[in-house]
Amino acid sequence: MTRRIMMSSSRNFWRRVWDRVPMFFKENIGRKLAALFLSTLIYGSVRNKVDSHVYIKDVPVRITMPDNLVLMDDAPRFVTVKLNGSKMVTQGVTENDISIDVRVVPSLYKSGSNIYPLTISLRDIKTPFGTSPVSVSPSKFNLAVNPLVSKMVEVTPDFESKPGLPSGYAIGKVSLNPKMVRIEGASSILRGITDIKTKPIPLGGITQNFDYMVDLALDKSQALTVSPLTVMAQVEVIRSHEQRRFSAVPVRVLASSTDRTNLEYEIVSSPNVEITVSGLKNLIETMRKDDLKPYVDISRFDKPGLYNVSVKCWSDRDGVNIRSIYPESISVKIEKSAAK
């Protein structure tokens, strides 16, 4: 019973509202609602078809080079593209939705020139469906280019300095296979390249000959192509010898102690000599002048006179070779002792 009363009250409420609506709105209500719906559709359609212009900034330019030219400056290039299209389409376009691919035409490059005038045309620009490019700014670039050339260069070995070979050892003969490699790149860069180094070859703890496959050290900033990229290094390891020169080493005189009581001697030329020695590097580096004992032997002379005597030398350090003595001889004067 209560539910029926509530439903009746609701119908009476809406009837009173309808009675208050002006007759203008109540006449042909179906047609008017249909017209409102159609006008909304037409408005939306027209609004979407209205052309609009937008400017898309920082659009990257992709440059395609021919096989016989090299782009010297690979810095990115950006432009601003003006687009035409409906607002619904253009309002969501970003620089990532546009691609620009420009090809360098070899026939337009002037031999001997390092500048190529690049022009971007509208047909180089690809835009989203429903849009079209109107203009691009800037539309011209000057590109730094070089002819692509190749040549053969020598390979030179490089070695790690730390850790190096053990003390007393040194690098002998080094053979590389191949000795020459082909490099390809811009003509202005190749002009100054006469050889190419290997990456450092490790030496730590090595005391005998060895073979080592090593890559070539490439400067990535020069954009070079090298063939082959790896060479075989055959390295000879030898005992390290070194030479050293000692100056002003005093000369000793060896004289017989018998039958010479009435004779005395005197060095009348320079009493010092210059001595060059050789031996293992670690031995020679620690030598001192006192380790060398140059001398002249006058024991065979038993009469007064002026004698030119060869200088000899010995050392108390094992493994030391006497390479030279200068001067090779000195003058010694022998005379009778003055009477006491």
Image (tube, rainbow, N blue to C red):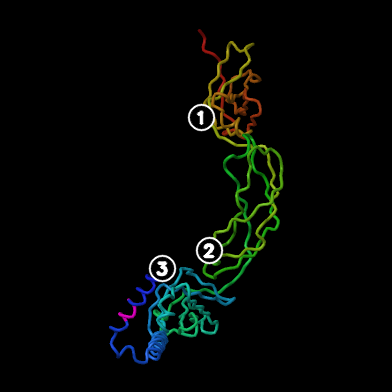
Q: Nearer the viewer, residue 287 or 300?
A: 287
Q: Is residue 14 magenta?
A: yes
Of badges 3 and 1, the one in the foreground is 3
Q: Nearer the viewer, residue 11 or 63?
A: 11
The residue that appears at 58% across and 34% down in the rendered structure is: 276
Q: Which segment did they paint magenta?
A: 13-17
The mark nearer the N terminus, 2 or 3, is: 3
Residue for badge 3: 1
Residue for badge 2: 222
Q: Is residue 52 left or right of residue 278?
A: left
The residue that appears at 66% across and 52% down in the rendered structure is: 214
Crowd band around label 1 with a 10 angstrom C-alpha radius: few (<14), some (14–19), many (20+): few
Which amino acid type is marked by label 2? Gln
Crowd band around label 3 with a 10 angstrom C-alpha radius: few (<14), some (14–19), many (20+): few
Q: Position of residue 66 (x, y in %)?
A: 57, 77
Q: Is residue 170 magenta?
A: no
Residue 147 location, quadrant? bottom right
